[in-house]
Amino acid sequence: MLSIQHCNTSAPAAIAPISNQTPGTVEMAAMGNKDNQTAYARLRRRSKATFLLFASSLVATDFAGHIIPGALVLHLYSNSANQTSRPDAICLFLGGSMVFFGLCPLFLGCAMAAERCLGVTRPLVHARLVSTTRTKVAVALIWLAALLVALSPVIGLGEYTYQYPWTWCFIKVLGNTKGTDVAFVLLFSGLGLASLAVSLVCNTVSGMTLVLARLRRRKCPRRLAKSHDIEMVAQLVGIMVTSCICWSPLLIFGLMSVRHSYSRHSETNDEPYRTLMVMGVRLASCNQILDPWVYILLRRAVLRKIYRLTTGRMDTRGSTFRRWEISSFQSSEKNTVKRI
């Protein structure tokens, strides 16, 4: 969390010389500093635990989203389905899996961005509202919401069909589309694009807050952005950029295809839209592979090792990683104790 401490004349650094203080005053000041360090460490552990719970849920979802649909696609490829094949149980399950594992990472990324934005901009509110139990409930609700959307065809909202080149199944966007198909595509694409937009706004606010905190360092050295906040926001930005690149084409191409299919008055060529949908799903399939690597590679420890390997410098003094301290709050408090 972002430590917000204002410069004023009552700061611990302005404590009078030890010769003018009684032993009781010195002891109370030292105990107060120790309590502050303990409280901050507790809040930091809770913040990291919440973020890691979201991140582990995202990695697990991406792993399942890569294995399950991939196995079904291989099965359909080996069976050589064609355009006239009617959707069977495997096709329906694959279509539902595509929707479920497509929305879950977007929803989780949105929730992670919102949680970090609250932690960076309103740390006290974050400490009061966010807990491990509530985070688990939020993850469960996200999975449930994605599952309900994937099960929409059960209640008659849209349907899943074979898609060109007939080796995968997804929402019906071409052919004899109906109003329910359009509504299903609008629901899926709208939720996905809205999640990406919320993630963009939250990560922008978090990033700007951290940048402003860094800029205030010259005026108030004790008002600093914490390294774990910077690390988590950097990971979120990487995940958001990856999701935008991988999922935006499929979400947009789906809207374009269903609009073309539903609004046409005569038989037209669907080949360009089929090609766009294949391109979109190929990009989307990369998201489950890239998300865990983005999270791993943007960790500070990994970046430090990459920096050492690429520069040949074993000592990071004078570099950005050296200035990226683990806890500037604890360092300033220790300096205050030493002065006392």
Image (cartoon, grey):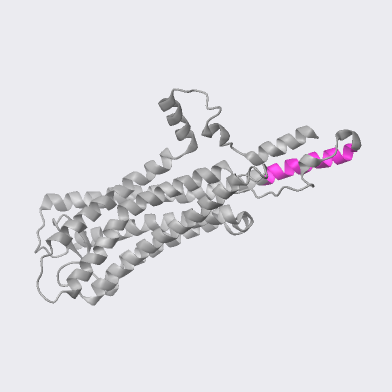
Relative image position of residue 275 (x, y in whole percent): 16, 56
* Residue 109 appears in view: yes
Q: Where, quadrant-wise, is the C terminus in this rendering? A: top right
The magenta stretch spans residue 292: no
Q: Which residues are magenta?
A: 21-39
Relative image position of residue 268 (x, y in whole percent): 10, 69
Q: Is residue 39 left or right of residue 169?
A: right
> What secondary structure is the stretch in magenta mostly built from?
helix
- Taking depth in this image into account, of 200 and 40 the one nearest to the observer is 200
Q: Is residue 172 left or right of residue 321?
A: left
Rendered view: 303 above or below 108: above
* Residue 163 appears in view: no
- The residue located at (58%, 55%) in the rendering is 121
- The residue located at (50%, 43%) in the rendering is 231
Relative image position of residue 126 (x, y in whole percent): 59, 56
- The residue located at (49%, 48%) in the rendering is 233
Q: Is residue 110 left or right of residue 286?
A: right
Rendered view: 157 above or below 25: below
- The residue located at (52%, 27%) in the rendering is 316
Relative image position of residue 238 (x, y in whole percent): 41, 46
Rendered view: 288 above or below 313: below
**Residue 148: quadrant of the picture:** bottom left
The magenta stretch spans residue 28: yes
- Taking depth in this image into account, of 56 and 186 the one nearest to the observer is 186
